[in-house]
């Protein structure tokens, strides 16, 4: 692998190849060597993949900054921008789908960290018109969210989705990462019958503040995540999330209290506090928000402690369905990541295999049991 050539192709901000490539991890997928950047370094996004045999680069997806107040946050961030597009931010599993091998190779689904997920790959090939799309656009990447109650990574309920579906929120160049403009991307996806996030409109940045507020009110009432605001060319973007999502994430974190760091918890509380101020919460509304926030912290933690006390398994609960071979590949993939899996049921429904399982939260389980047994905690 010519590291100097890849350094230039990636547009890295260092002149020393070793500074960047010491952070790449080598993996083997389908008989090919993948070099994966496990964390953002020197201007190159986390999850960027180099496939040595085919000389292909699959660029990682950029981190989206978060705005804590809509006014003046949106106009300030998009200063000099004529218009912005507003779309729903979906609560799912973010994967990039690309052909990373030679012409004619089947597309792969890459996680944010650059892993190839065999289950998501199989479901994407089954659910999306990938052959038709990549025949015409071989060097593009479909940036998607896998959403629905039956996925191995998230399990948020969406109306009209019984199992899972894909939603394409971006189309980018495989190597440069340059996005297709928002309007062009929505037209392109519509041509192939590919689902996309809900559209809330397009306006100049100042007018977008009120549009986002209305969208957030509607999404919050439905327990949805939030919105992404993008410049028309797709180059710049920010996100903003709902109160219900902040509390749901806190509930998730405190249901597995020793799996997530303080930064995870604190950031959600900070978001809620700034939102309360900008929303002009009355004393009564602030008390309601505080009660909901407190319940999202205490109730799930108490429930988990009781489960450990009673000998029940604790962790993330998921259900997946699909081709039996794809299900086997999924559990091999999870095993490779040293996860402890507790299968609850494994059955056939028509031609598909359906498995319910728990990703066991060993750290939380063991720490809680230690305290229940009389262990002490240094504070």
Image (spheres, rainbow, N blue to C red):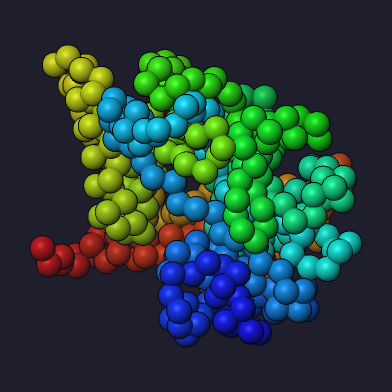
- Where the N terminus falls, by quadrant? bottom right
Residue 96: x and y in percent read 64, 53
Report whether residue 58 is seen: yes
Give above or below for 241 relative to 265: above
Residue 36 in the image: above or below residue 135: below
Residue 50 is drawn in which quadrant? bottom right
Q: Which residue does the image show at 58% across and 23% down from the upper left?
A: 199
As drawn, is 126 to the left or to the right of 208?
Answer: right
Q: Is residue 214 left or right of residue 199?
A: left
Camera-nearest residue between 252 and 104: 104
Residue furthest out toward the left: 379
Q: Position of residue 322 (x, y in %)?
A: 77, 49
Q: Is residue 48 left or right of residue 65?
A: right
Q: From this viewpoint, which residue is outermost toward the front?
A: 80
The C terminus - image quarter: bottom left
Nearer to me, 77 or 219: 77
- Which quadrant of the view contains residue 300? top left
**Residue for point 40% across, 17% down:** 207
Residue 130 horizontal side relative to residue 79, left or right: right
**Residue at the spot 75% in from the left edge and 56% down from the top edge:** 139
Image location of residue 351, percent across then percent down: 87, 46
């Amino acid at each position: 692998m010519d590291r100097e050539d890849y350094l230039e192709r990636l547009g890295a901000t260092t002149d020393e190849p070793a500074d960047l490539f010491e952070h790449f991890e080598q993996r083997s997928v389908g008989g090919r060597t993948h070099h994966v950047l496990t964390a953002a370094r020197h201007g190159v996004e986390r999850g960027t993949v180099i496939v040595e045999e085919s000389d292909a680069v699959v660029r990682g997806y950029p981190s989206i900054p978060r705005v804590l107040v809509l006014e003046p946050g949106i106009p300030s961030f998009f200063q000099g921008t004529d218009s912005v597009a507003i779309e729903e931010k979906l609560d799912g599993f973010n994967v990039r789908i690309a052909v990373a091998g030679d012409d004619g190779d089947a597309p792969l689904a890459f996680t944010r960290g650059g892993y190839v997920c065999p289950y998501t790959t199989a479901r994407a090939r089954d659910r999306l018109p990938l052959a038709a799309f990549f025949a015409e656009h071989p060097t593009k990447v479909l940036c998607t969210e896998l959403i629905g109650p039956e996925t191995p990574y998230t399990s948020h309920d969406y109306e009209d989705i019984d199992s899972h579906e894909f939603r394409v929120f971006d189309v980018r160049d495989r190597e440069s990462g340059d996005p297709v403009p928002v309007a062009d991307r929505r037209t392109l996806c519509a041509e192939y019958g590919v689902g996309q996030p809900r559209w809330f409109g397009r306006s100049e940045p100042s007018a977008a503040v009120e549009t986002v507020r209305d969208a957030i009110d509607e999404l919050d009432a439905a327990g949805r995540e939030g919105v992404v605001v993008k410049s028309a060319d797709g180059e710049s973007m920010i996100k903003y999330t709902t109160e219900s999502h902040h509390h749901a994430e806190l509930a998730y974190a405190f249901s597995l209290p020793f799996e997530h760091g303080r930064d995870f918890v604190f950031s959600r509380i900070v978001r809620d506090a700034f939102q309360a101020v900008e929303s002009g919460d009355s004393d009564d509304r602030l008390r309601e928000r505080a009660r909901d926030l407190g319940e999202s912290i205490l109730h799930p933690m108490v429930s988990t402690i009781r489960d450990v006390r009673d000998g029940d398994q604790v962790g993330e609960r998921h259900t997946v369905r699909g081709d039996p071979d794809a299900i086997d590949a999924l559990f091999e993939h999870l095993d490779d990541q040293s996860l402890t899996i507790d299968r609850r049921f494994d059955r056939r429904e028509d031609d598909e295999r359906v498995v319910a399982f728990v990703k066991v939260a060993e750290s939380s389980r063991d720490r809680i049991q230690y305290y229940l047994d009389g262990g002490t905690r240094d504070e």
